[in-house]
Image (spheres, rainbow, N blue to C red):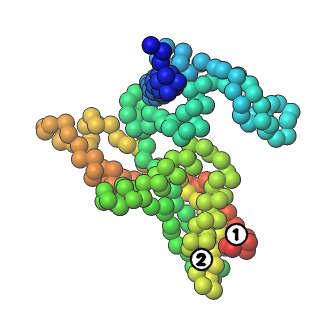
């Protein structure tokens, strides 16, 4: 008895869905494997001719081209599923950071401004404002001056007052090292080796400022 066309289409659809699921999980596994890993290296090196915008040496702007591109990296990035090993082993973050600014007004007064800091919030507030952590990470990791200029203009618009506009925004990055858990000077050597990191990283944290941008606000920036 011959299979109906609908039955053939159904089988093909199931096969395609299964292949996509295998492909998707292979991409995710390859991406989250810690380095160094020969499996990760091999999977991320797989390439195919794929369309996309790219710019070769000597070209003024990017062009739409078909060229050999890494399959997994293209899929992960263009579907916004990428992530990195920032919090966990083998290379956990060694520094606490946040972004702030010294804001000067046209009347001569000034104030200190900081982006929302999750470590100063309760868990509900931190969950609602967690996008600011991602913004901070991207700004610090990317090191693109135009991004900081856009941040300075945004701060100027947010902090300007009626009849007293912001004229200058100095953006600072504040860093505080995260102490090792086994440092003898942080705990009582006669007790168990346990540290109250909530206290160390909040109340006792000492931050060092680094100027990343000194921006003079233009009248058009406030519109």
Please provide percent x and percent y for residue 89. 38, 30
Please provide percent x and percent y for residue 42. 54, 15
Viewer-nearest residue: 2 or 195: 2
**Residue beneath disc 1:** 221
Tell me what residue is drawn at x 51 percent, y 36 percent: 82
Please provide percent x and percent y for residue 4. 49, 22
Viewer-nearest residue: 53 or 183: 53
Tell me what residue is drawn at x 47 percent, y 24 percent: 7
Please provide percent x and percent y for residue 221. 70, 69
- SS for callout 1: helix
Tell me what residue is drawn at x 79 percent, y 38 percent: 62
Q: Is residue 20 visible?
A: no
Quarter the N terminus occupies: top left
In the figure, is residue 144 to the left or right of 13? Answer: right
In the rendered structure, find residue 160 and report the number of the disc placed on it. Answer: 2
Tell me what residue is drawn at x 39 percent, y 59 percent: 128
Instruction: Find the distance from the CA under tag 2 to the CA under tag 1.
Output: 11 Å
Viewer-nearest residue: 180 or 100: 100
Say above or below: 205 vs 25.
Answer: below
Say above or below: 168 vs 108.
Answer: above
Q: Is residue 97 visible?
A: yes
Which label's residue is closer to the chain start, 2 or 1? 2
**Label 1 Cα neighbours within 10 Å, binned few <14 / some 14-19 / many ≥20:** few
In the rendered structure, find residue 93 and report the number of the disc placed on it. Answer: none
């Amino acid at each position: 008895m011959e299979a109906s066309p609908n039955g053939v289409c159904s089988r093909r659809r199931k096969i395609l869905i299964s292949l996509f699921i295998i492909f998707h999980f292979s991409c995710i596994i390859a991406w989250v494997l810690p380095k160094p890993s020969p499996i990760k290296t091999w999977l991320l090196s797989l390439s195919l001719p794929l369309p996309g915008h790219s710019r070769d040496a000597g070209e003024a702007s990017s062009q739409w081209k078909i060229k050999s591109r890494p399959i997994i990296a293209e899929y992960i990035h263009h579907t916004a599923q990428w992530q990195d090993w920032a919090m966990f082993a083998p290379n956990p973050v060694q520094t606490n950071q946040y972004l702030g600014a010294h804001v000067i007004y046209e009347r001569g007064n000034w104030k200190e401004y900081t982006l929302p800091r999750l470590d100063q919030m309760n868990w509900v507030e931190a969950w609602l404002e967690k996008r600011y952590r991602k913004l901070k990470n991207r700004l610090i990791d990317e090191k693109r001056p135009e991004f900081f200029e856009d941040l300075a203009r945004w701060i100027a618009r947010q902090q300007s007052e009626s009849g007293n506009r912001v004229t200058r925004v100095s953006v600072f990055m504040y860093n505080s090292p995260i102490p090792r858990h086994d440092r003898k000077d942080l705990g009582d050597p006669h007790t168990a080796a346990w540290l109250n990191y909530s206290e160390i990283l909040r109340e006792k944290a000492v931050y060092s400022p680094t100027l990343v941008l000194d921006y003079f606000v233009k009248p058009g920036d406030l519109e």
